[in-house]
Image: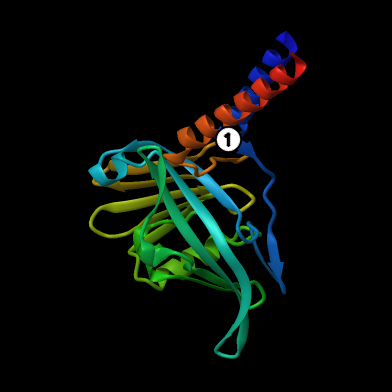
């Protein structure tokens, strides 16, 4: 009886921990000579550490999911294309930023042609979260210049962008092409600042409001099984 109780407690604790945080090792996708830091269906999560606008104050975590990575032809050349979904976490639930953004175009890239292109949506929202590797901030800066940014500055692995109207974007990348810190400022006031959760990248399971329901169902099921075992032993 005591052994059964201990086993039950350990099982429940393990389930809670597993459902809360799941560490994984991210892969990367290489198509032709172009590489993207994530495989298809892989995700990365950032934590909001500062926000001053009501919209961003409600966001606790931000998750980028690479929904597809594939080769396609454009203007007679082959490029790596990346589709993505962006999720915002608040009120214990993952919410898609916009239904129109699901599986949307994120970027196209060709290493040999020194070609990189982002969707206008990603550019104007300043979500420079994941970039091709090996890291080439000059290429990224030149690509963004095509959208008439007033100025861009490279400082080590940090890219600083001037989006007009006194708005500055600061993105710091690691060698994997993943943003470790993304901060948007207007008139020197932080609009939002996101930081990668850990160096090992922790993925938060998107159970949202259903987590408690699943946990209760799991506990009830396990208790029912244990009761049946006890009755059989009697």
- The image quadrant where one finds the C terminus is top right
Q: What is the basis of the colouring in this image?
A: rainbow
- At a point 53% along the width and 63% down the height, the residue shown is 138
- The image quadrant where one finds the N terminus is top right
As rendered, which of 17 and 45 lies closer to the eye?
17
Left or right relative to 173: residue 149: left
Q: How many marks?
A: 1
As rendered, which of 107 and 96 lies closer to the eye?
96
Residue 90, placed above or below residue 128: above
As rendered, which of 71 and 206 lies closer to the eye?
206
- At a point 63% along the width and 57% down the height, the residue shown is 38
Look at the numbered disc 1 and give the secondary structure of its residue: helix
Residue 67 at x, y percent in the picture? 55, 63
- At a point 60% along the width and 41% down the height, the residue shown is 201
Residue 219, placed above or below residue 107: above
Residue 227, placed above or below residue 26: above
Q: Residues within 10 Å of mark 1 (few under 14, many from 20)?
A: some
Residue 4, placed above or below residue 121: above
Which residue ends up furthest to the top in the rendered image?
A: 2
Residue 21 at x, y percent in the picture? 58, 35
Task: Provide the residue designation for mark 1.
Answer: 19
Residue 121 visible to the viewer: yes
Residue 13 at x, y percent in the picture? 61, 23
Residue 122 at x, y percent in the picture? 41, 63
Residue 130 visible to the viewer: no
Left or right relative to 110: residue 193: left
User: Which quarter of the figure has residue 224?
Assistant: top right
């Amino acid at each position: 009886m005591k052994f059964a109780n201990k086993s039950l407690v350990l099982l429940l604790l393990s389930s809670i921990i597993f459902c809360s945080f799941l560490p994984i090792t991210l892969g990367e996708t290489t198509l032709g000579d172009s590489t993207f830091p994530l495989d298809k269906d892989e995700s990365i999560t950032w934590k909001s550490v500062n926000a001053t606008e009501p919209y961003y104050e409600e966001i606790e975590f931000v998750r980028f999911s690479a929904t597809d990575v594939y080769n396609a032809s454009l203007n007679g050349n082959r490029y790596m294309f990346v589709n993505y979904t962006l999720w915002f976490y608040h009120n214990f639930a993952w919410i898609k930023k916009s239904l129109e953004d699901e599986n949307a175009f994120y970027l196209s890239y060709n290493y040999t042609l020194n070609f990189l292109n982002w969707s206008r949506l990603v550019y104007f929202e300043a979500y420079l979260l994941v970039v091709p590797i090996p890291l080439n901030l000059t290429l990224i800066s030149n690509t963004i210049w095509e959208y008439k940014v007033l100025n861009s500055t490279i400082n080590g692995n940090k890219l600083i962008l001037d989006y007009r109207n006194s708005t500055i974007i600061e993105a710091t990348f690691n060698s994997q092409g993943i943003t470790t810190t993304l901060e948007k400022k207007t008139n020197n006031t932080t609009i939002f600042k996101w930081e990668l959760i850990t160096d090992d990248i922790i993925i938060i399971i998107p159970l949202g409001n259903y987590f408690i329901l699943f946990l209760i169902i799991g506990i009830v099921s396990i208790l029912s099984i244990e009761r049946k075992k006890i009755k059989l032993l009697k």
